[in-house]
Structure formats: C-alpha cells, structure tokens
Amino acid sequence: MRTPNGGTIPQVAIDDAGTLHLIYYTGSMSSGDLFHVSRGPDAPDWSAPQPVNSQPHGVNGLGPIDAGQLAIGPDGLLHVTWFHKDPLRFYYARSDHKGRFEPQQTLSVKDEGGVETAPTVTTDDDGNVYVFWHADAVEDARRRVYMAVSRENGSLFDLPRAVSPEAEGACGCCGLRAVTDAEGAVHVSYRGAGDNIHRGMRLLSTADQGRTFSDQLIQPWKVGACPVATTTLGVGPEGTLVAWETEGQVYFADIERLDEPVSPPGEANFRRKNATVAVNDRGDTLLAWGDGPGFMSGGTLHWQLFDAAGRPRRDEGSASEPIPARSVPTVAVRPDGSFVIVF
C-alpha cells in the first residue's frame, strides 16, 4: 500500500480487531505535521486523517530517522512520539477512545542538544508507557540512550534518565526502536558509537519495567562516520526479532540468537537499508527494505518471506513505484497471518 495523502515516513501498527493504524508525515524537511489514519479489516480505504501534534508544523521530517513512532496500548489507545529542532525537544501525544489526540506533552526537561532522530515508544499490559531517545550535545562516543516512563498510561511521565552504558555511546544520526515482548520485557535496538568508530547495533533489555537494563552487541560495524540507518523490532509466537543494516546489507535475528543473523539472498543494486520486520503466528517472517544510494533516496521497495527456520521462501518481490525520497517501508501482520507493507 502507498501512504495516503502524499505522506512519507509511515509507521503502521494493527490492533486486536484487525484495524490498521498508520501515522505519517507531511511537510518540508525541517518542519511539518503528523497525521493518523485507520483502516478496518473490510474498509475500502483509509479513514479521514486526524492531526497528531497539537502545535502546527512542530515535527522534524528530514529523513528516514525522523517523523513519528507509534505504539498501541492494551486498551486500544494510540501513543505517538516525535521531536522538533526549534527548540530541540521530544514530544508525546496519546489518543482518546474516539481517535482524536490529546494536547501534546513535552518530555524534555532541557535543550536536547545534538538531536537528529525521533524517539521511540512502547507500552505494556500494566499501563506503563516507555519512551526512549538518545541525546547530548557531545561527540557520539559520549551520547547515551535515555528513557522517560509513565506509570499512568501516558498521563504523566517520570523525569528522563540514562539507561545505556556510558562507554558504548550512541550514533547520533541513526534510529532506535522499542518493543514489548509477550512476557512484558522491553527491548530497545540502537546503534552504538564507542570510541566514535564502533557503530554496531546494540540491544537494551529490561525485565523489571525499566528499573534495570542489560546491554549487548547485535552485530559489529567499525566505521568512523554515522551511516544514517534505521532499525525495527517485531514480536512473534516464539520470540522477538530485530532488523538492522550493516555495511549496506540488511539482517534480522531472534534476540535470543543474535549470533545467527539472516539476510535476504541476492545482491544490492546500491545499498540495502531501512529494514522492517514482522512475524506471524506460524513463524513466517517478512523482511522489507529499500535499495537505493545514500540515505535521502527511498530506493526500490523489496521484500522477502522466510519460514520459521529462517530459510527464504519463494515469496519475494519488489514494487514498480519507488519509496518516496527520505521515506521508509513499514510492515504489520493481520490476524489471519497475512502481511501488509505500507511505503
């Protein structure tokens, strides 16, 4: 599916009733707005767009690491996060039960110098809302991942605190992503920047609702510059998958078997990037990505289906229309196990 209304940088999620929820960005590279649309299982088209940010033109949308991120809570409410550079702040908004969004909240308590990428959000069944970002007006090797958590379903947030190891840094222009698994543990994938050259993907995990975190390397990448890359996470019946890019190739792996990464067959025409992953109840995994030069081009959309053992199936393809510039693909799983890709 194409993102409606000329939108870019989409993020899709699906609720228990099988309704698709999509947020997307419209505007210039420096400022614009987020909108939400939905689409029921039998609906012929998307709903009318509803604004997410209550401060007009208050969202940054330079590239694939920007715009908004979305989570659906157990009560069906939507939780969205984003940032803007004037001033440098992180923001959050929650929907009501009619699908309208409440006034946005500012999560930052200071100028978040050095911000280049949107925050990420996830929820759990106990009404906790977790928002993560990386920041600090310092070199990447000294940046860290921060968390602001609400124990009141997004009504009020605690003050943010650093949760990643100081020595690992955080790559300033690379995205991060959070998800809550079936057991209630929260995982965050982010790109480190140790010594400004060790920019491999890393995984933060907490099993006690954000009170303590473990940190582990997903895959190394030694590079002296930020690659401007994204990451996603997907929860399935047997575990949680993480998807990422290293040196122009995209991968996914079960977070319990990070030493067994899987990549799609074939070779890139330019650069494989912006990997997004989802897994259904049968254990089938869909990986979608863009293939294009640099980070500003969306590239050609490709996808590959894998079986439960990580073996590529014949279900692969590409789109005739390119992913829009500065944008990404996003995937979700329907209740019947079929996949949907929006770009």
Image (cartoon, grey):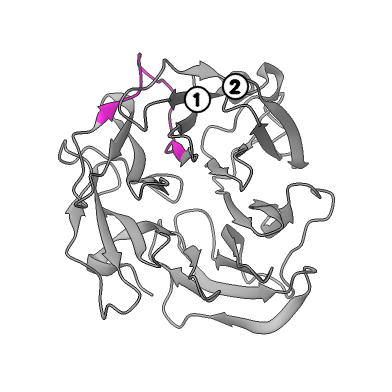
The residue identified by callout 2 is 163
Q: Under tag 1, what secondary structure?
A: strand
**Residue 1 is covered by the magenta coloring:** no
The reply to whether the C-beta atoms of the residues labelled 2 and 1 are less than 8 Å apart is: yes
Name the spot of residue 237 as percent of width and height, x first: 66, 60
Between 16 and 305, the one nearer to me in the picture: 16
Q: Decide if residue 91 is in sight here.
A: yes
Between 167 and 138, the one nearer to me in the picture: 167
Residue 311: image quadrant is: bottom right
Mark 2 neighbour density, 10 Å: few (under 14) some (14–19) many (20 or more): many
Between marks 2 and 1, how big is the CA–CA gap? 7 Å
Name the spot of residue 45 as percent of width and height, x first: 25, 76
Residue type (three-letter) at the residue carrying disc 1: Met
Furthest-right residue in this view: 259
- Disc with the residue nearer the chain's start (2 vs 1): 1
Indicate left or right for 316 with 219 as reference.
left
Q: Decide if residue 137 is in sight here.
A: no
Which range of residues does the magenta coloring cover?
105-121
The vertical placement of 270 against 184, above or below, is below
Residue 228: image quadrant is: top right
| Quadrant of the image containing the N terminus | bottom left
Instruction: Name the residue rendered at 34%, 59% in the picture.
Output: 22
The residue identified by callout 1 is 147
Indicate left or right for 4 with 225 as reference.
left
Indicate left or right for 189 with 300 as reference.
right
Residue type (three-letter) at the residue carrying disc 2: Val
